[in-house]
Amino acid sequence: MNGLSIHGIERRNPARPGGQQLKEHCNEAVSPCAACRVRPLNICNVLLKQVSPKKGISKASESDWQLHAREQARRNLKSTGERSGRLGILCDGWAFRFVQLPDGRRQILTILLPGDVITLTRIFDEKIQFSVQAITNVHFCGYDRATLKARLNTDDEFLGAWSNLVIIETRRNFELMVDLGCRSADERIAHLILETKLRLKQRGLVVDSTFKFPLSQKIIAEATGLTPEHVSRVLASFRRTNLIESNEGWLKITNLSGLQRIGDLSV
Amino acid sequence: MNGLSIHGIERRNPARPGGQQLKEHCNEAVSPCAACRVRPLNICNVLLKQVSPKKGISKASESDWQLHAREQARRNLKSTGERSGRLGILCDGWAFRFVQLPDGRRQILTILLPGDVITLTRIFDEKIQFSVQAITNVHFCGYDRATLKARLNTDDEFLGAWSNLVIIETRRNFELMVDLGCRSADERIAHLILETKLRLKQRGLVVDSTFKFPLSQKIIAEATGLTPEHVSRVLASFRRTNLIESNEGWLKITNLSGLQRIGDLSV
DNA sequence: CGGAGTTTTGATTAGCGTCAAACACTGTGG
DNA sequence: CCACAGTGTTTGACGCTAATCAAAACTCCG
């Protein structure tokens, strides 16, 4: 968790005085989406390619239908039951979806990487069913829910893009269920590393089997249903057997086939 | 697993000679959908209320766009990677979605009750990502995928109904992840019982806290990520403390608040 | 320098898995 | 009719994985 962010956007935001001022809108003249590299991974490409008047979106709402914002590491972007009316997309940085039980136990449902849709079902679901927390400093944008809903009914391409994401997400949910239900600690952690590497590779963020990995062991524990202590032991054993190297929020897979033998992605 | 089925449809199908003849189409003069009681729970109501020509469905395809079939208990309805081109709905009987790992381990993803959509994302997903197995004898129907996909683009009500099911399913997937990731064996099993009771209640299939429960302990084990032996012990302890009574595929909750204290549904 | 959070390591324990055997139930074939 | 196999449930003994408890080393940051 050093100062480098993935897309070269530095973490050193202007220091904010109070902790209450959570979200900072960036009303930049030029939309940051123009330079976004992860647009093809989600629905932004489809949404932004043509904001034509014939779609029935008035000029007035157009200026407001997409809002950009930032948030500091470790702060919540969304909380269970919230009704913000916006579908969020993570432009830059890492975050995770999680559920918090009354007694403090937490389960991480999804690690969110740059380009991921934060609240995919928000188009139809008023209340979201989980909370979202930033891992690093993040930059995200929110589309107006009503506008998207209307567009889903008229724009076949958008419907296709959205449902494609639903399918990908469902598939990953199933994988996590299999992990939690019937795999050992070694397998779960190896799987998490391999899956994250794969997703980062799709974003061009893996060089020489090395990639940014800002997940603390507590986060890995909550994502895999283990304790931080046990995660530490497993990672230590992976390092001892020369499967991985890690430091300073970076991770390198030094023995890919060895790691795959433990946590292969084939379901 | 006695001879009675939930909707009064008897299990005694005409005896079939070979085991190979898996599926039996029911080309009845009157559609069984007319008497279906679970239609309001899924997309059938919307789909069947008006099959009007103006939707662009030709008379020829209309006769074929919905097919009814049956399957025996313990047989697979679908297998991973299959490409049948139909979206299935469970009309009667119980089934489950599962993933099978190469080494034989299995994880049940969803228990399917009468009225549930078997392959919800099949509209967009050519290959399904899991297998489906019948628990009891089942009766199901399959809608033509291409027809549904076309209709999703033109029929707002259908889109709404479908996406509503996607949300409900996502929510249940998240609940299972929390169960598997951070709850004890007692909690998981109590939760499974309570959730199943709730879903049966929506279908009017619970009387006096008593309901059909044809899940073997092996199935409960695969659904909760436990072993059959341990499930047996937990259920025995539930019975010993007078939380539940069970026999012959039926289950009665004799101490609801006690069971809720263990496996409450609130997430 | 001090405090908070993270990682590491060790010792101990508990929950659940594994192995095994007995029993009940069902359907099958002789 | 019985013998038998196959499957599911129950129970016991034992073992192992991972949790728990605890404490020290390390990092980051004011």
Image: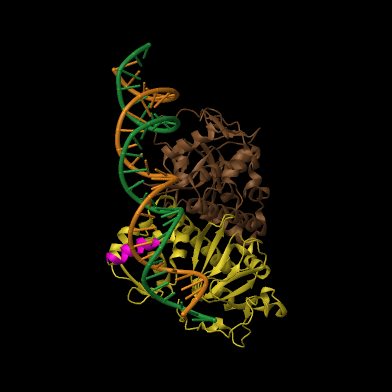
Chain colours: A yellow, B brown, C orange, D green
Left or right for A114, reference B51: left
- B267 in magenta: no
- A238 in magenta: yes
Left or right for B96, reference A56: left
The answer to whether residue A17 shows anywhere in this view is yes
x then y, percent, for residue B243: 58, 35
x then y, percent, for residue B66: 56, 46
x then y, percent, for residue A221: 45, 61
Residue found 48% across the figure and 44% down from its top: B185
Question: Which of the two residues, D11 or A116, is positioned nearer the viewer here?
Answer: D11
Question: Which of the two residues, A123 or A82, is positioned nearer the viewer here?
Answer: A82
Place residue B244 in its image quadrant. Answer: top right
Instruction: Look at the picture and state if C26 lies above or below B150.
Output: above
- Looking at this rendering, what residue extends furthest in the bottom direction? A29
Instruction: Look at the picture and state if A162 lies above or below C28.
Output: below
Place residue A158 in its image quadrant. Answer: bottom right
Residue found 40% across the figure and 47% down from its top: B106
Place residue B253 in its image quadrant. Answer: top right
Residue found 44% across the figure and 68% down from its top: A216
Question: Which of the two residues, B33 or A24, is positioned nearer the viewer here?
Answer: A24
Q: How many marks?
A: 0
The answer to whether residue B67 shows anywhere in this view is no
x then y, percent, for residue B16: 44, 30
Mainly helix, strand or loop, the magenta region? helix
Left or right for A96, reference A249: right
Question: Which of the two residues, A31 or B189, is positioned nearer the viewer here?
Answer: B189
Q: Which residues are magenta?
A: A231-241
